[in-house]
Image (cartoon, rainbow, N blue to C red):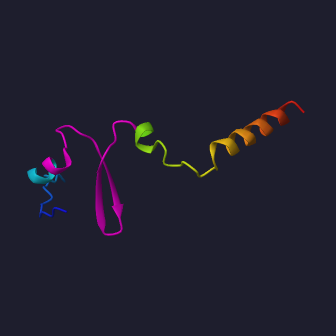
Amino acid sequence: MNYAKVRLSSKRQIAIPADIVRELGLKSGQDFIVRCDGVRIVLTPEPESYTRRFASTLRGVYGDAAGIRDYLRKERTSWDE
């Protein structure tokens, strides 16, 4: 993990050191998400696609594929009643 001391400018800007930019593969003009986590500032590169970023993160939360299909089949059948 790289550490560096940076200064907040009068325009509220912070320069990310070049070695960290290279290490993370950051590009000029890239967007970031900034959040406050207690006393820390967390700067995260915005994903190109939120769909790809979160794909499969909920795998297994609602059971396996067969269980989900059975549940949906029962629900859809109840619509006709």
Tell me the quadrant of the picture where the C terminus can be found: top right
Q: Is residue 4 above or below residue 64?
A: below
- Location of the N terminus (image quadrant): bottom left
Look at the image and say whether residue 70 sits in the magenta stretch: no
Q: Position of residue 21 (x, y in %)?
A: 15, 48
Q: Does 54 sit left or right of 27 as displayed? A: right
Total labels drawn: 0
Quarter of the figure with residue 52: top left
Classify residue 30 as left or right of residue 20: right
Q: Is residue 72 above or below residue 61?
A: above
Farthest residue, direction right: 81
Please report the bounds of the magenta region as a residue range. 22-49
Image point (86%, 30%), residue name? 80
In the image shown, does 63 or 2 lie closer to the viewer?
Answer: 63
Magenta includes 39? yes
Horizontal and vertical percent position of residue 74: 80, 39
Left or right of 56, for residue 49: left
Instruction: Please provide percent x and percent y for residue 44.
Output: 30, 51
Q: Nearer the viewer, residue 70 or 41?
A: 70
**Relative horizontal placement of residue 27, taking residue 18 as reference (left or right):** right
The picture quadrant where one finds residue 17 is bottom left
Name the residue furthest bottom: 39
Does the rendering let one see residue 17? no
Residue drawn at 9 percent across, 50 percent down: 18
The residue furthest left is 18
| Residue 29 drawn at (x, y percent) | 20, 37
Q: Residue furthest top?
A: 80
Q: Please state which of residues 1 and 70 is positioned toward the viewer in this rendering.
A: 70
Q: Is residue 53 visible?
A: yes
